[in-house]
Amino acid sequence: MNTNSTLSLFEAELRGHPDRDSAVDLYRHMLDLAQRADANDHEGLVRALDAWLKQRSEPRTMIAVDIAGKLKLTELQEELGRLLNDVRANKAFLPHYARWINEAIQAMS
C-alpha cells in the first residue's frame, strides 16, 4: 500500500462512516485502519497522515493527530509542533485543540 492508496482508503472510510456513529467510534475505526496500514507500509502511512495534518481541516487533521500519538509516529512530531503553534496563534482550530495535539506529542516521548 502506498501513500495514495492509503489516502484513498482513509477518504473512502471517512465518507462511508455512518453518521449515527460517535466521533469516538470513527476515531477507533480509523486507528484500526491505520494500524493495518502501518503493518504493510509504514512510510506510506506517515506520508498520508502528514498530508492530513497539513490540511488543517476537521476531522482529517485531528484524526491524524490521534493516530500519530497513539502509534507514536515520531516522524510526524515536527508537523505536530507546527500545528500546535498554529493553534496557539489562532491560525488553525480553536484554542482547546492544543490540548489534544500536545498530548499526541507527549505520547511520543
Image (cartoon, rainbow, N blue to C red):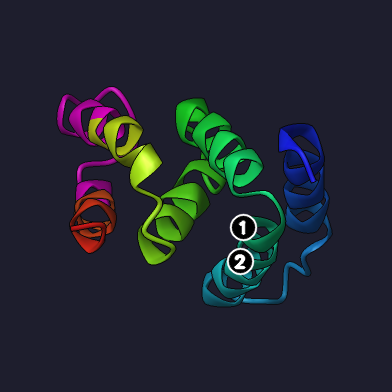
The label on residue 79 is none
Mark 1 falls on what kind of element?
helix
The residue positioned 51% from the left and 54% from the top of the image is 63
The residue positioned 34% from the left and 31% from the top of the image is 79
Question: Is residue 76 in the magenta section?
Answer: no
Residue tagged 1: 38
Q: Measured from the top left, where is residue 13 in percent x and y?
A: 78, 57
Residue tagged 2: 35
Q: Which residues are magenta?
A: 82-98
Along the viewing direction, whichever of 55 and 31 lies nearer the viewer:
31
Question: Is residue 97 in the magenta section?
Answer: yes
The answer to whether 105 is drawn above or below residue 90 in the figure is below
Mark 2 falls on what kind of element?
helix
Give, as a three-letter code, the residue at label 2.
Gln
Q: Quadrant of residue 83?
A: top left
Q: Quadrant of residue 27?
A: bottom right
In screen coordinates, is 91 left or right of 4?
Answer: left
- Dots 2, 1 in contact, CB < 8 A: yes
Mark 2: give few (<14), some (14-19) or many (20+) Cα within 10 Å.
some
- The image quadrant where one finds the C terminus is bottom left
Q: Quadrant of residue 23?
A: bottom right
The answer to whether 52 is drawn above or below residue 67 in the figure is above
Mark 1: give few (<14), some (14-19) or many (20+) Cα within 10 Å.
some
The residue positioned 72% from the left and 57% from the top of the image is 40
Q: Measured from the top left, where is residue 81 in percent x and y?
A: 23, 34
Give, as a three-letter code, the residue at label 1.
Asp
In screen coordinates, is 102 left or right of 92?
Answer: left
Q: Marks 2 and 1, Cα distance to the nearest angstrom?
A: 5 Å
Q: Measured from the top left, where is residue 3 in percent x and y?
A: 71, 35
